[in-house]
Amino acid sequence: MSVEEANNRERAALNKLVKRTTDLDFNKGTLLRFLRARNLDVKKAEDMIRDSVIWRKENEYEYFGSSYEFWKPPPEIPTGFDVYHCGYDAEGRPVYYAPLGMWASAYDMFKKGLEDDCLRYAGKSMDQVHKRLLTTKHQNFVCIVDNTGVTFRKAFYESQNFAGIQDLIRLFREYEANFPETLHKAFVINTPQVFYLGYNIVKPLMTKHTLSKINIFNQDESKWLPAIHEHIPIDAIPEKLGGTAVMKPMWPFDKIII
């Protein structure tokens, strides 16, 4: 939902928040997302925004010329955790595809001493998506998460990575705190039962509103394929899922002008 589609109550709260944040460089769409994340409580939304500003400075997200801007991940990270921009939905929201089930082992990456690089890449990826959203009307995205390849053996192996699980929890908390209300709809497909072992860990970290946008399907293609084609244009759907999208890897990151 864009600012133009906000109801009267949301507009009233937004006007108050705009006046309280004149010292910050946030557009109305971003302010509205923070408001919705705090159920239109202006004071709580302001506190959330200011905490996010501190977080972004501490993590160098806003500084051109910083080590963050010029940092490049070890090549096995973007190839091992690949995400693709497939295009846009009918209302201009970016569509992403993540072949989660075929991703590399985070546990193996951590054993190689790449924990900090993995986390930095995850954070920079979230920031890249956010920068793209700021150029759109609705400021939220659609994603397809493909669990093809997820097995009990893989899940059991990754479950031994205690540090990785803690990092995953922290990443979800940071996402909810600093990139609120950015998910429009998620299609999680080809999902085996073992997937829920990990999902149930992060589920309590997400708001009810975020959870309501996540649609999880098992391996029955007759269920998830029509749902995807109903909500996403064919030119933004990966070819392997019956679409014609030109899939652009997340890495290398684009220089997005806001």
Image (cartoon, rainbow, N blue to C red):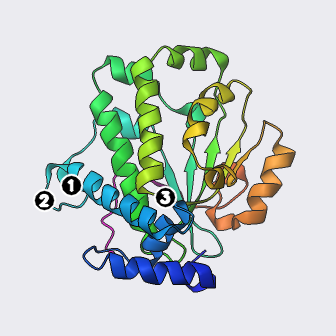
Q: Which callout, 3 or 2, points at the residue further toward the start of the chain?
A: 2
Q: Residue at x 73, y 37 (%)?
A: 190
Could you tell me if residue 163 is visible in this image?
yes
Q: Residue at label 1?
A: 69
* Residue in front for this viewpoint, 40 or 242: 40
Magenta-colored span: 248-258
* Residue in front for this viewpoint, 99 or 212: 212
* Disc marking residue 180: 3
The amino acid type of the residue labelled 3 equals Pro
Q: Quadrant of residue 130?
A: bottom left
Q: Residue at label 2?
A: 65
Mark 2 neighbour density, 10 Å: few (under 14) some (14–19) many (20 or more): few
* Magenta highlight on residue 163: no
Query: Mark 3 near mark 1, Cβ–Cβ under 8 Å?
Result: no
* Residue in front for this viewpoint, 249 or 47: 47
Instruction: Residue 215 in the image: state x and y as whole percent.
Output: 72, 49
Counting labels gives: 3
Q: CA distance from mark 3 to mark 1?
A: 23 Å
Residue 188 vertical position relative to residue 19 in the rendered view, above or below: above
